[in-house]
Image (cartoon, rainbow, N blue to C red):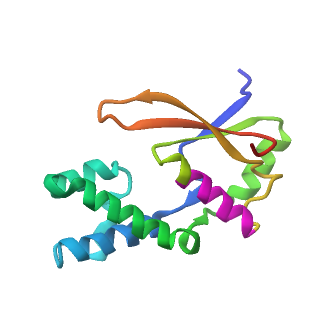
Amino acid sequence: MTFKTVLFDGTLADTNRLISESHFVVMEENFPGRFKKEEMAQFNGPSLEEIYGNLDQSRQQELVARYREVMLAKHDDMIGIFPGIKEMLENLKQEGLRLGVVSTKRSDVLKRGYRSLASRNILTRSSVPAIFRTRNLIRNRSSWLWSVWMLKEKPA
């Protein structure tokens, strides 16, 4: 079997610290002392609507909006890349494979992450050309909207 396309599940960029720190700020502001910083990893994965709806359904939208505000303010300083990712992407590209990312993140956040990493030469056009096209793929039982991002040769 020959593969022509490789899809990643959004874990190319290391946003774990960013996500945990953003959740912790929101938790401390709204549920002081209820959570420890070390417990924030449990919130990495579920949708924001699920997390904050479970904590306070009546304030779900407000809490989600605050999380996004905090996360965007910290985003460019806290996003990184996992060890070996840059080299792996360059090797896959040299093999002629099409690359893509599947994620529940909003498209503006994915684009911002790519641009932030590219601007610091962590990712380059040769390793990941661009992330600029999205298509809805599936909706699973918890109603998360998944998108497939194809990494194209030229930015739109």
Q: Position of residue 23 (x, y in %)?
A: 33, 67
Which residue is pictured at 45% across the width and 27% down the height? Answer: 138
Which residue is pictured at 78% across the width and 52% down the height? Answer: 127
Viewer can see residue 16: yes
| Marker count (numbered) | 0
- Can you say which quadrant of the picture contains the N terminus? top right
Going by the image, does 19 lie left or right of 31?
right
Residue 111 counted in the magenta span:
yes
Which residue is pictured at 71% across the width and 27% down the height? Answer: 3
Q: Position of residue 37 (x, y in %)?
A: 31, 75
Tell me the magenta residue range: 109-120
Q: Position of residue 151 (x, y in %)?
A: 71, 41
Q: Position of residue 24 (x, y in %)?
A: 32, 72
In terms of depth relative to the viewer, which is nearer, 10 or 111?
A: 111
Q: Quadrant of residue 118?
A: bottom right
Which residue is pictured at 41% across the width and 66% down the height? Answer: 69
Going by the image, does 55 lie left or right of 97?
left
- Can you say which quadrant of the picture contains the C terminus? top right
Q: Main secondary structure of the magenta part?
A: helix
Q: Quadrant of residue 58?
A: bottom left
Farthest residue to the top: give it: 1
Viewer can see residue 35: no
Residue 105 counted in the magenta span:
no
Is 82 placed above or below 106 here?
below
